[in-house]
Image: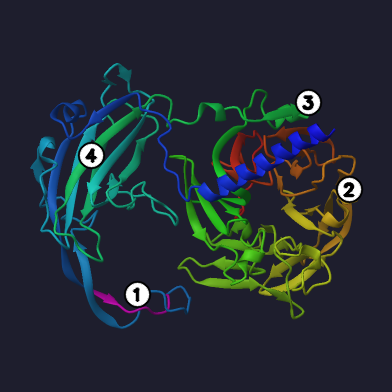
Amino acid sequence: MSRIYKIIRFQIILFFLLLLAIALFAQETRQLAVDKPQAIADLKTAEGAAILNARWFVQNAHIVNADFKTPGPGTNGDQLPLYPTGTAIKTHQLHPQIGAADFDKAFKAIPPTELERRQGTGLLSFVWYKVDLTIPATIGRLNTTGTTAVFEIVMDDYSEIWVNGKQMQGFGQNGNGVISGYNTRNRVILTNNAKAGDQFSIAILGINGTMGKLPDNYIWVRNAVVDFYKDGLPVNKSWADDGKIFAIDEKLHTIIAPGTKVEKIADGFSFTEGPVWHPDGYLLFSDPNTNAIYRYNPKNHNVTVYMSHSGFTGADIGEYGQPGSNGLAIDKEGRLIIDQHGNRRVIRIEKKGPVTVLADKIDGKRFNSPNDLVLKSDGSIYFTDPPYGLPGFFNDKNKELDYQGVFLIKNGKVSVVAKDCGGPNGIAFSPDEKYLYVGNWDIRDVHHTKTVWRYEVQADGTLKNGKIFFDWNLTEDDEAIDGIKVDKEGNLFVSAPGGVWILSTEAKLLGKIVTPERAANMAWGDDGKTLYLTTHTSLHKLRVLTGGKFSWE
């Protein structure tokens, strides 16, 4: 026995040393080229440019005087001084601007072989490049029909890209048209379904830098290519089928088609939670452990930090296990609503950036740590408030409420609408909003409280007749109920012991979704028929026939 004990002890020590090594050498950022394209057109060579009938042009951009106004209130009734409605002032503008009538006026043709020629005036300098190109029928041996074509440029020093006069912009974005970094690649997808004859006019603004201390050099093109991918942008092949779907009832096949794969789409996180689909076409999700909100772009598969310090900025953050944001939602005006663990409040990020505190106290007492939330179609916000964002959970010295509740924010007022659950967590409405579902995870008695409750929603938003809808106490896991989502037919997708359990409106178990790490929460995304799963250190997704409503609907 002593020998076995020593072996086990040695293995445990090795395990913790491995965790320590991961913590010490973890990467703050990762930019990986997963695989090579099937064909490349090098736009800096005559041969490569000829393949796409690419024609290059260049012109200097200049700083000119412009009229503007100081910040003032909006014409939309917003009284905050955030809009150009104040006193007239003189400022500056870059000329020409993309889309302006005279934008193309001063362009001069330049051979692709001369893209390394230094351009601009040096020091504070800006140069517009433009390349017009046409997708060929073939490139090398590759038939381009249906391929994904990606334009990539490396500018000395910075670049911005517009394709056919448009640029995708979003908070937390790195590259994909906006500045990606110093002398680094900037990549934009031209098309995911190429056809011979497709034409693109690509405008690139070259910027000399760094701006704070201007170098004594000029602007030029280090690299410019179009990459062609036969089957879309490359992904890790082992991620294509990274989960199991178990059908317990035949009805599941009308919800999830037989043969549907669970796909892994990102990894490397600490603990993913609270996802929401943004109307601009990307997924936001929290990592409460690292105090960040991430942004996943399904078009190029990139993940960037959308918001740092998303849930707490206190000096004692080192005492917290999960200080960051958790549940996220987006309202009908496109504003992000955030449950903040460490700050113990629910906030809204206004369209122009200011933060509005929607709820931080009730009856003069601070909330525990708002966890998950859901929006009603009338704009009301319901959120759960267990103490799991506090360092000491239920016994935390700073805990002020003597209960864990479900709360309602309506017309600027906060009220408690349920106190049945010792650890209220996931929350979701039925499609007709007649019922509100709340998951329970009470770590004080986890094996007797693994339940989802269903409440009847009254006309004034209050709840009544709360009853246990489904009971998981028969499971042996030390985990209970986390996130909940409901499809358009009323079926529940519940993060429960062992995976995501799919329940009918009559509380009948229809099936399960099992991933290597259990999904903590979910969100409907893409066209509403993709279910994104936040799976601890990863992200997964799968297609669902029934689909669900977006948070702002």
- Does residue 2 lie above or below 338 as drawn? above
Residue at label 4?
223
Residue at label 1?
84
In primary-sequence order, the first of circles 4 and 3 is 4
Q: CA distance from mark 4 to mark 2?
A: 60 Å
Mark 2 packing: few (<14 Cα in 10 Å), some, or many (20+)?
Answer: some
Residue at label 2?
447
Amino acid found under the numbered disc labelled 4: Asn
For residue 234, what is the image quadrant? Answer: top left
- The stretch of residues the image draws in magenta is 67-74
Residue 70, magenta (yes or no) = yes
| Residue at image location 68% in from the left, 42% down from the top | 13
Could you tell me if the residues under marks 4 and 1 are in contact, i.e. CB atoms within 8 Å?
no
Q: CA distance from mark 4 to mark 3?
A: 55 Å
Residue at label 3?
250
Amino acid found under the numbered disc labelled 2: His
Q: CA distance from mark 2 to mark 1?
A: 58 Å
Q: Pick whichever, 542 or 341, lies toward us.
A: 341
Q: From the image, which quarter does the N terminus lie in?
A: top right
Amino acid found under the numbered disc labelled 1: Pro
- Does residue 334 lie above or below 42 as drawn? below
Circle 4 or circle 1, nearest the eye: 4
Amino acid found under the numbered disc labelled 3: Glu
